[in-house]
Amino acid sequence: MTILYFIIGIIVIVGLFVYLKYFVPLRPKELGFEYVYVNEDGTVSELDEEDIEYLETEFSPADGARPYIKSRYNELTPDKKKSGFIMRNRVPKRIEIMPYNNPSEGRTISWIYLALSMASETEPTDFNGISMIADGINHAVPTHKEIQTSISWLSEKGLVSKVGKKHTLTAKGRDDYKTASKDTNTLLKIWDNMEQKIKNYAKHCI
């Protein structure tokens, strides 16, 4: 009987430890969506409408497109990054949750646009392919959110299409890449040209 009580005690202690570490709220109840985003620099920000819609989407357990939700602020995602979605009440109280800062800027979108253009020259590419090329262009790895948001923007403009779980350029997108690459082999210059095209598309939407 003593051994049984000992085992039960261990189970209770472990259960309490897991609850305190992964589930107990770390800040009082606040207004706003239940999830927020931890940026790579450690700051935390609110989500935009696209991210909220993405998190509210129902996915099957085997769907690779399901969002990864961090259980702790300091937890690294499977690809060893600090950035990722997390429940608002799991963000330590000392950390301020900043307003959403639109990542859909011309420079970021054109960076992903160029990376996707290069990665899909022979066949549609996935996020990993885009990320590797983007790293080679800018010596920095884009976050999943930067890729997701940029592709959504490009898709809305008819520049990128989805093929299964991968992405490729539309005829319009290929024309942009061809024009941006004309008379130059310098990635930075091509990137600048792609950014100008993004700015032009943005102006037409105003």
Image (tube, rainbow, N blue to C red):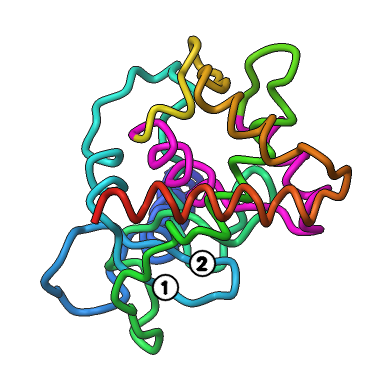
Q: Assess whether residue 134 is covered by the magenta stretch.
A: yes
Q: Quadrant of the N terminus?
A: top left
Q: Picture coordinates of residue 181 (x, y %)?
A: 76, 38
Q: Magenta part of the protein: which range?
A: 127-156
**Tag 2 residue:** 39
Residue 44 disc label: 1
Residue at the image position 75 percent from the left and 58 percent from the top: 140
x, y (%) of residue 82?
A: 60, 61
Residue 3, position in %: x, y? 51, 46
Does the stretch in magenta take in 140? yes
Do we see residue 91 in this rendering? Answer: yes
Q: Nearer the viewer, residue 13 or 79?
A: 79
Horizontal side of residue 92 vs 165, given as left or right = left
Q: Secondary structure at mark 1?
A: strand
Mark closer to the chain start, 1 or 2:
2
Q: Which element is circle 2 on? A: loop
